[in-house]
Image (cartoon, rainbow, N blue to C red):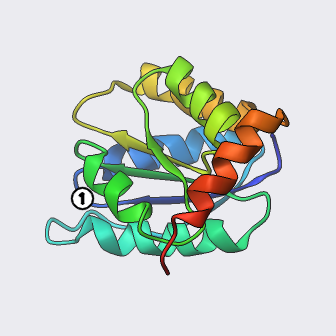
Amino acid sequence: MTNSVIYLGADHAGFQLKERIKLMLTHEGFVVHDMGNTAFEQTDDYPDFAKLVGEKVAKGRLARGILVCGSGVGMSMAANKVKGVRAVLAYSEAIARAAVEHNSANVLCLGQSYIDMKAAEGVVRAFLDEKPSIEARHKRRVKKMKSLEVC
């Protein structure tokens, strides 16, 4: 998925990991848009960045997003409030792959406090390398998920 557009976002608790992921992706040829925070700020709030990244991903046909906070839970919950976003909190490559293949996940959430950089790199690569399934059963389930969106 090289040359794809990737939107990144993180609060203070995920800032360091986001910066390292940004360097990795840029080095690998991805078009990276950092939606913030662009500086460490102890008082920032994760829903702000989840909204910014979520809105961009929902508008872009081939765009994907990566969000980082302390646990990944808050980012995941907030991002999934944005219509068109299917965010997954993943700590393993297998979960990241399955979320994209089976559920057409378009935003990956990570928890800086619970994953080391080497593992995070693997999860990010798995998420970005996987493609959504074209099998009827997966398409049907994603369509049903979309029908649950209220906004």
Q: Position of residue 137 (x, y in %)?
A: 74, 34
Q: Is residue 26 visible?
A: no
Q: How many marks?
A: 1
x, y (%) of residue 31? 74, 56
Q: Is residue 124 above or below residue 143?
A: above
Q: Pointer 1: what residue?
A: 12
- Is residue 3 toward the left or the right of residue 65 in the image? right
Q: Is residue 27 left or right of residue 46?
A: right
Vertical relation: 131 (above or below) 150: above
Considering depth in this image, is 33 or 76 the residue closer to the camera? 76
Q: Residue at x 48, y 76 (%)?
A: 150
The quadrant of the image that shows the N terminus is top right
In this picture, residue 142 sits left or right of residue 95: right
In terms of depth relative to the viewer, which is nearer, 149 or 32?
149
Single out the residue that lies furthest toward the left.
43
Q: Is residue 134 above or below residue 69?
A: above
Q: Which residue is depicted at the point 48% across and 71% down? A: 82
